Image (tube, rainbow, N blue to C red):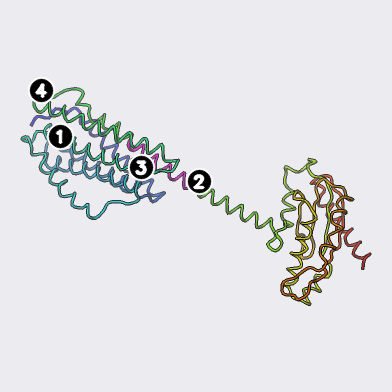
Amino acid sequence: MAYFFQPSLVGLMLQAVGAALFAGLCILLLRTRRSGPMAYWAAGWASLLVSLSSLWVAFYLGTARSLGQTLYLLGEYVFGYLVIAGCRRYARGRGPDRREAWLLVPAVALAVWLPRTGGGDFNVFFTIHTLLYAYLFFAAFRVLRRANPVRRSQAGIRVMKAALVLLVIDYVHYAPLFAASSLQWIPQTVPYLEYAPFYDLIVLVLLMFGMVMIETGDVQHELEAANLELAQARDRLEAMAHSDHLTSALTRHAFYSMIEDPRHRGRRILSGCAAVADIDNLKAINDRYGHAAGDAAIRAVAAAIRSCIRADDLLFRWGGDEFIVLLIGVTQAEARARLESLNARLRQTSIAGLHEPLDLTTSLGYAPFDSAASLDEVIALADTAMYDRKKAAG
């Protein structure tokens, strides 16, 4: 049997080595992330390794040539099918169907029959094989066209589709050349065909590159999604830490986070007046009507304070019965004018569960501030002023 590409055994061996490396890379990727498409592609590259190795042994040793060629054909058909299966899993979310198992029958039949056509001439059976093989890559391309990849995997999809198109062109263009060689219309040692395995290897590398880009793009997308979820969870936890669940006012933690922020230090970014509001006789309300009534009273005071201040002002729940108000950009006299109506607003406050409204009152203390760094000391001054006022009233 005359076969013309004996010098290309080196290229065939390089293809086998490349398939081994690709299969190994897919397996490594599978160890870091279980991916359905990559599992099929890894099996496909392993099948191609067996296929090319069998053909190389058959040509190099010259023994069991028919068996080697049969394994070569069957291995390439399995490779093509697994490429399709991986693309289908990626594009449609489903892999091979059990009903497709019958495809193994014609694949085996072709793998056994083709090496015996044309008197065992490699050029004859390879002419037919290249067309069948090209169709498998065309089928994979059609499946991949329906994929809706995430943004990070779009480049990988484009590279893989380009590789599949090139593989179709590559193997289709072999058919007339090998047919002409088998009919002796062209010399059997055409240099262009002697290096055919190198052309195939280049496109196969591009195909593998596209597969890896798809996988890494999906991983990057999942990491970004996970980071977004973590950021959202962090924001929710931070909001919970900064917001009092009973009154929705800011917490003491939020206050210290503000004044301890390095961006606030040494800068005159806040000025105004701090006010401390303490609910009078809250313990008596709790003892007489219960803690539910006490919580309702606290919520009522918070709502009343909000009705006295502006959206830019800050309301903190400082303790069980104490609130801090930072009135931004106002003098102490202006702050006093805003909040002195607070007790009037709290007269005849309706409390859930009580038949009659209650007259709630608060004691207020004020202290001006001119920077965020001084707020902690200002709160202490306002607190002292509040207690002095409470003693004077009582």
> Is residue 164 left or right of 391 when viewed as pictured?
left
Judged from the image, the secondary structure of the residue bearing numbered disc 4 is loop
Q: On the image, numbered disc 2 is attached to which residue?
A: 224
> Do the numbered discs 3 and 2 sit on residues whose CB atoms are within 8 Å?
no
> Do the numbered discs 1 and 4 sit on residues whose CB atoms are within 8 Å?
no
CA neighbours of label 3 inside 10 A, class few (<14), some (14 to 19), many (20+): some
Q: On residue 25, which mark appears? A: 3
Q: Looking at the rendering, which quadrant does residue 110 occupy?
A: top left
Judged from the image, the secondary structure of the residue bearing numbered disc 1 is helix
Q: Earlier in the sequence, mark 4 or mark 2?
A: 4
Q: Nearer the viewer, mark 3 or mark 1?
A: 1
Amino acid identity at mark 1:
Phe
Q: Residue at x 33, y 41 (%)?
A: 144
Q: Earlier in the sequence, mark 3 or mark 4?
A: 3
Q: On the image, numbered disc 4 is attached to which residue?
A: 185
Q: In the image, is residue 207 part of the stretch drawn in magenta?
A: yes
Q: Earlier in the sequence, mark 2 or mark 1?
A: 1
Count of all numbered marks drawn on residues in the image: 4
